[in-house]
Every structure is written in structure tokens, then in C-alpha cells.
Image (spheres, rainbow, N blue to C red):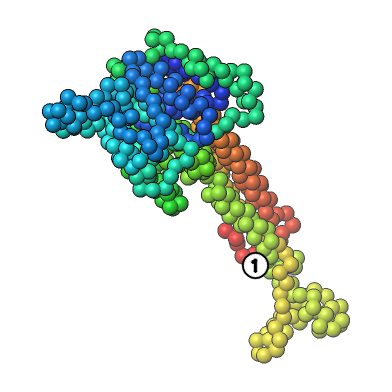
């Protein structure tokens, strides 16, 4: 099935529906992958209309629909007992026209049935088989769309809940969609919308071909890495996802790529995963936020990691700018603090430089014998050699080269997302926008880090140098080299 035909099919199915585009598309994707969908929301939110439209996507597919209550009996779902079989001591049902005979089914209030019915449904949903008397029937079931107002918390319900790969929250339309609902709602309610011509419908052979194409696709390393990270994160949040569900998630991603005519799954397809691994809208949003913040961003160029590198250079520059060295006079002799000179009286201060130097040298010698030592001044800023400064700038140049490479790679990722979004059939618009916004934020952060790294480089280049004009050779002899 080519992508143009698929897009036309989806447009036809969506006709007359208000704010149900993504829900319908996910239901159809699940059906193409042979999976089931659970719609969670209050009554009157077009859940049954969605199921009927999904049925129209398939050629020669029988449809079954039933509302379950606590009084529902197995005959309502699986068919009445065969009187003739009972006469022959066999316990069999007439399944024609009932759930075991259907290709697409809608079961409303799925959790209101008793545990016996739910247990019987488990095998039917997972293995597509139904135990009818002493034999087991192979069922033509493509997909079941269930609906419920809420999911109860008990062991049987949890096992049944796990059979639905996609869990989609369906709420009332927004204030913006209310006018369109009143204008177009009659068509959706009566079922006149979404008529699909046979040329657009999918036959059994086409579905089998599509599933075979999906099975041949591999999950690339970046997708597997992200799924592994997500699994670990969910485990840390005390949220268990079964191995069976992870396998089905991989199959759904392959079907998304194959149905769009792509040769490989892309990391952007992971936007479908929140609907599979979280049970409600709040949990799905948390998973979507986690994914959107990580897709397209390698750990190597994550802003927090690179920020620490830039901060290290900035801290080093600050330390070197503020570092002081021993001070020397023009003759290359150490200067002593003014307090030491003043302490020895004004007569000492009136001596010429040579006499002071001799006197100070004498006092230093006396200090070795027990007198108080004089203090040398550190008022002069430390000066650095060319080798030291060159070493610092070379390091920053290497960092700038890394930042430029990361920015180029990130730009390629952003272009990849834009190209994928332009042709994506199943993507959630909100997730795509969040991923694009995150990548833009990372790009801005990398640009700011480049600016700071360049500023640090300029700072190292302007450090006081040992070979500055006016520095006497005698002073250089006493200067401790920074490099």
C-alpha cells in the first residue's frame, strides 16, 4: 500500500469527526499491526463512531459490536449453544455473527463483564483462537477496540488491560472545537461520514503483505538504545512494562515505518511509545516529555556535560587573572612590603635604593639568625609565557571544534525531524512540536557555549605576558614561568 493511498484512506475516515484525528489514526495503526486499542473516556465522546470507521478501512471484514454489563452472559458475545450438538453430547456454540466470527469488534464497557467472560476473551484477543467445545477455532480477528470509563484495579482486569497495546484517552472536545462539533456532529453521529470506497479499503492479501514488510525491518541502534533507557527509567519510577508488551511496541514501530513506505524505523517513531507503555494520559505525557527531551540529542553533546567543560575553562581563566607573583623593582630586586619599611623608621625610607637594598639584605641575614623576617610583596599580577597561553588556546580550539561538529550534527537531526514530520502519517503533532522545541533549545545552548568558549579564549590571549615591553631582563630571571 503506497503512502498516497494511505493518506487518502485516512482523510476519508476522518471526515466529520472533530478532534479525533490522532485517535483514529492510532486505532488504524494498531489494527494494521494486528493489535488492540482501549479507548478511555466518558460516554458520548465518539468511541463507537471511531470503531465503526476503523471497520470500514478493511474489505470484506465482518464487524461485531456489544455493550457489556455485569449481567452479560457468554451467549451475547460468543453465540448461542448448538441444540443439535447438545443432543450429540457436544458443547458447541453457533459463532456465526458473533465475536469469534468478526474481523473488527467494538466492545463497550469492557471491564463490566464478569471474570468468566474476561478470561474467555484473553485467549481470543491474544491468540485469535476460541475454544468451542472440544475444538479450538481459528478466528479472523484483526483488531478489537474496547471502551471504558475507567480501568478497575484487580488481577483479572489487569491481565485483560494488558491485552490492549494502545491505551488512548478520549475526552470532550475543546472550546475551540465546540462550534465544529455542532456543525458537523450530526454526520458523525449518524455514521454517514467516513464512507470508504472499495478502492481504498485494505484486503486480507494487502494486510499480509504489509505485515511481512514490517517484519523484515530492523530496529536501528539508536532506537534500541532509547528503548533500553526508557525501560530503565520506567523501572526507576516503579512502573512495570512486560516483555511481551515491549516486543509488541517494536512490532508497532516497524508497522509505522512499513506502512509509510520507509525502509527503516527512525528514532522519531518513538513518539508512539507513550501510548503503549503508560496507562493514562498523565503517565503518557510524562513518558512523552522524557522522550522529547532526549530524541536527537546524543549524550556527548548534551548541554549540561559541555557546560561543565566550559565552566572549567572559565574558572581557570579567573584563577590565572587573579593570581599574583612576587614583585621586583626595576633593578630586578625583590620588593618588600611598605609596612616593613615604615616599621623601621623614616630614616630608612629616606635612604637611596642601593642603601635600602643593602640594609634589607643585612636584615634578611639577621632574620636567619633569629630576627623577624621581612615580608615580600605580591602586588604584581602574574605574567605568563607564550607556551602557557598557547596551550590554553589550543585546548579551547579543540573544544570549539567539538562544539561546531556537535552543532552541525544537531542541525542534521533537526532537518531529519522536519523531513520526517512532513511525511509522517501516524505522528502526534504535539510530540513533534515538543521534540522540535527541545532540539531548538539545545542548539541555542550550544551557541551560547560557543560564545562563552570564545570569550574564554580571548581572555587567555590577553593575560599579562612575560615578554611585555618594559619588563627588565633581571626581573624575568626571577619570574616563575607559568608554563
Across and down, in percent, residue 269 comes to: 44, 31
Q: Quick check: 337 left or right of 87?
A: right
Label 1 environment density (alpha carbons within 10 Å; few <14, some 14–19, many ≥20):
some
Residue located beneath label 1 in the image: 478
Quadrant assignment for the N terminus: top left
Tell me the element at label 1: helix
Pick the front one: 50 or 214: 50
Q: 325 above or below 212?
A: below
Across and down, in percent, residue 116 comes to: 30, 40
Q: Which residue lies furthest to the bottom in this view?
A: 370
Across and down, in percent, residue 62 comes to: 33, 19
Pick the front one: 85 or 409: 85
Q: 47 above or below 340?
A: above
Q: Residue at x 38, y 37 (%)?
A: 71
Whether residue 337 can be seen here? yes
Whether residue 215 can be seen here? no
Q: Which corner quadrant of the image does residue 323 belong to?
A: bottom right
Q: Which residue is drawn at 24% across and 31% down?
A: 130
Q: Quick check: 305 left or right of 473?
A: left
Q: Which residue is drawn at 72% across and 80% down?
A: 374
Q: Which corner quadrant of the image does residue 356 belong to?
A: bottom right
Total numbered circles: 1
Q: Residue at x 37, y 43 (%)?
A: 157
Quadrant assignment for the C terminus: bottom right
Amino acid at each position: 500500500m503506497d503512502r498516497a493511498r494511505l493518506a487518502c484512506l485516512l482523510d476519508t475516515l476522518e471526515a466529520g469527526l472533530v478532534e479525533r484525528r490522532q485517535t483514529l489514526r492510532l486505532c488504524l495503526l494498531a489494527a494494521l499491526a494486528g493489535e488492540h486499542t482501549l479507548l478511555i473516556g466518558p460516554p458520548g465522546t465518539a468511541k463507537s463512531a471511531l470503531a465503526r470507521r476503523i471497520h470500514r478501512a478493511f474489505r470484506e471484514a465482518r464487524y461485531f459490536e456489544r455493550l457489556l454489563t455485569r449481567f452479560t452472559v457468554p451467549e451475547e458475545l460468543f453465540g448461542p449453544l448448538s441444540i443439535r450438538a447438545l443432543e450429540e453430547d457436544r458443547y458447541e456454540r453457533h459463532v456465526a455473527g458473533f465475536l469469534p466470527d468478526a474481523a473488527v469488534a467494538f466492545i463497550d464497557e469492557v471491564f463490566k463483564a464478569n471474570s468468566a467472560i474476561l478470561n474467555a476473551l484473553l485467549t481470543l484477543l491474544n491468540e485469535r483462537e476460541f475454544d468451542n467445545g472440544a475444538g479450538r477455532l481459528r478466528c479472523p480477528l484483526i483488531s478489537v477496540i474496547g471502551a471504558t470509563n475507567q480501568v478497575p484495579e484487580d488481577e483479572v482486569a489487569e491481565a485483560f488491560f494488558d491485552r490492549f497495546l494502545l491505551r488512548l484517552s478520549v475526552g470532550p472536545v475543546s472550546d475551540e472545537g465546540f462550534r465544529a462539533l455542532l456543525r458537523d456532529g450530526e454526520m458523525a453521529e449518524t455514521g454517514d461520514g467516513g464512507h470508504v470506497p472499495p478502492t481504498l479499503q485494505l484486503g486480507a492479501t494487502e494486510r499480509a503483505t504489509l505485515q511481512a514488510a514490517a517484519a523484515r525491518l530492523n530496529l536501528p541502534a539508536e532506537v534500541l538504545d532509547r528503548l533500553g533507557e526508557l525501560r530503565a527509567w520506567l523501572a526507576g519510577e516503579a512502573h512495570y512494562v512486560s516483555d511481551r508488551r515491549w516486543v509488541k511496541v517494536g512490532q508497532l514501530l516497524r508497522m509505522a515505518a512499513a506502512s509509510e513506505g520507509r525502509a527503516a524505523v527512525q528514532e522519531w517513531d518513538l513518539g508512539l511509545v507513550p501510548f503503549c507503555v503508560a496507562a493514562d494520559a498523565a503517565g503518557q505525557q510524562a513518558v512523552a516529555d522524557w522522550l522529547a527531551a532526549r530524541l536527537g540529542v546524543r549524550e556527548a553533546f548534551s548541554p549540561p556535560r559541555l557546560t561543565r567543560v566550559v565552566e572549567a575553562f572559565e574558572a581557570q581563566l579567573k584563577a590565572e587573572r587573579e593570581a599574583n607573583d612576587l614583585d621586583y623593582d626595576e633593578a630586578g630586586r625583590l620588593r618588600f612590603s611598605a609596612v616593613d619599611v615604615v616599621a623601621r623608621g623614616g630614616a630608612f625610607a629616606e635612604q637611596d635604593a642601593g642603601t635600602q637594598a643593602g640594609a634589607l639584605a643585612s636584615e634578611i641575614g639577621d632574620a636567619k639568625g633569629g630576627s623577624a623576617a621581612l615580608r615580600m610583596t605580591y602586588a604584581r599580577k602574574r605574567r605568563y609565557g607564550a607556551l602557557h597561553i598557547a596551550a590554553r588556546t589550543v585546548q579551547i580550539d579543540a573544544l570549539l571544534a567539538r562544539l561546531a561538529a556537535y552543532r552541525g550534527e544537531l542541525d542534521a537531526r533537526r532537518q531529519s525531524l522536519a523531513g520526517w514530520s512532513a511525511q509522517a502519517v501516524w505522528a502526534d503533532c504535539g510530540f513533534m512540536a515538543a521534540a522540535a522545541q527541545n532540539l531548538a533549545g539545545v542548539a541555542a545552548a550550544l551557541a551560547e557555549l560557543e560564545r562563552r568558549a570564545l570569550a574564554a579564549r580571548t581572555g587567555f590571549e590577553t593575560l599579562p605576558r612575560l615578554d611585555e615591553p618594559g619588563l627588565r631582563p633581571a626581573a624575568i630571571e626571577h619570574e616563575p614561568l607559568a608554563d
